[in-house]
Image (cartoon, rainbow, N blue to C red):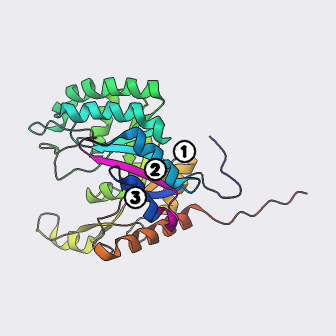
């Protein structure tokens, strides 16, 4: 475990997400707000994005202000061979971005229960784990259920701790882990602190997204009344104590990024999107850092 920098206390960077396509132009507009890291994302495929050129131009924009923490592709690699192939391309190209983590959905066989996806998962990610090991890269699965269930998963089987246990058993490589956030646990009424304590050693990237649970609605109506009982939130507006999360990450030796996954908050959205994200960034920084005070020398 590397010791934290005494001057800046930045063992964990605080950043946000940006689309890979057009990333340099977007980064120019937002890096000045104080974001320290960025995850660059793709939806389903790499498409016509020139990875080496995008990496070069993005890093030139960021300079010494921020880093690219991770890159990701969010599709269904268990049903879409092109998405699976693009996972491998990203893993092999992560070095151009200076990124050590490639993120995305694990995929799903959408006409079968989660457990019946395991043989295909082992085939696809058994291979990708070996590629990641060779490249010195970690694979991190986001936990979003994408509207699926255990019996009818959509896009992603990695939405349940029970599935994670199966997945880690099927492919034992520690190149494979989680892109974790409290929000997705809370949507399932899982205590995120207890969840993180169990799986913290497999957390390789963190999405900065929180949730607010309306326990009064649940207690009065349950979860099947059609009434909304949980909302995705930008950090600083939700229920989670991120100081506890950062403490647990540090105790486990995590040295990576918390990158805000915006565009979900019901209040700080549209014209207020970046207002909410910058507040979330400052909130997370306040949870991470306290001013350094040197110890007495005698």
Viewer can see residue 274? yes
Q: Position of residue 236 (x, y in %)?
A: 43, 70
Question: Which sits earlier in the primary sequence, circle 2 or circle 1?
Answer: 2
Circle 1 is placed at which residue position? 252
Q: How many C-alpha atoms fall within 10 Å of the one at disc 1: few (<14), some, or many (≥20)? A: some
The boundaries of the magenta stretch are: 31-48
Element type at mark 2: helix
Circle 3 is placed at which residue position? 25
Circle 2 is placed at which residue position? 58
Q: How many marks?
A: 3
Name the residue furthest left. Answer: 111
Query: Left or right: 5 with respect to 211?
Result: right
Question: Which sits earlier in the primary sequence, circle 1 or circle 3?
Answer: 3
- Asked whether residue 104 is drawn in magenta, I would say no
Residue for point 30% across, 55% down: 184
Q: Position of residue 238 (x, y in %)?
A: 37, 69
Is label 1 or label 3 in front? 3
- Give the quadrant of the N terminus: top right
């Amino acid at each position: 475990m590397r010791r934290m920098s005494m001057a800046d206390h930045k063992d964990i960077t605080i950043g946000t997400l940006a689309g890979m396509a057009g990333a340099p132009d977007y980064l120019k507009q937002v890096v000045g707000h104080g974001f320290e890291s960025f995850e660059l994302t793709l939806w389903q495929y790499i498409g016509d994005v020139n990875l080496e050129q995008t990496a070069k131009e993005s890093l030139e924009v960021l300079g010494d202000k921020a880093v690219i923490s991770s890159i990701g592709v969010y599709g269904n690699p268990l049903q879409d061979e092109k998405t699976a192939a693009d996972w491998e391309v990203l893993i092999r190209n992560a070095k151009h971005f200076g990124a050590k983590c490639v993120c995305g959905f694990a995929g799903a066989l959408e006409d079968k229960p989660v457990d019946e996806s395991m043989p295909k998962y082992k085939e696809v990610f058994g291979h990708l784990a070996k590629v990641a090991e060779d490249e010195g890269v970690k694979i991190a699965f986001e936990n979003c259920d994408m509207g699926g269930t255990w019996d009818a998963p959509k896009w992603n089987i990695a939405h349940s701790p029970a599935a994670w246990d199966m997945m880690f058993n099927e492919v034992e490589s520690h190149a494979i882990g989680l892109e974790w956030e409290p929000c997705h646990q809370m949507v399932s009424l899982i205590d995120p602190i207890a969840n993180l304590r169990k799986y913290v050693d497999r957390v390789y990237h963190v999405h900065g997204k929180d949730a607010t649970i309306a326990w009064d609605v649940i207690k009065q109506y349950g979860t099947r009344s059609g009434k909304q009982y949980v909302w995705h939130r930008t950090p600083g507006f939700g229920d989670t104590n991120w100081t506890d999360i950062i403490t647990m990450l540090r105790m486990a030796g995590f040295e990576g990024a918390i990158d805000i996954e915006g565009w979900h908050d019901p209040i700080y959205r549209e014209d207020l999107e970046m207002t909410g994200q910058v507040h979330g960034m400052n909130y997370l920084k306040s949870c991470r850092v306290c001013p350094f005070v040197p110890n007495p020398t005698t």
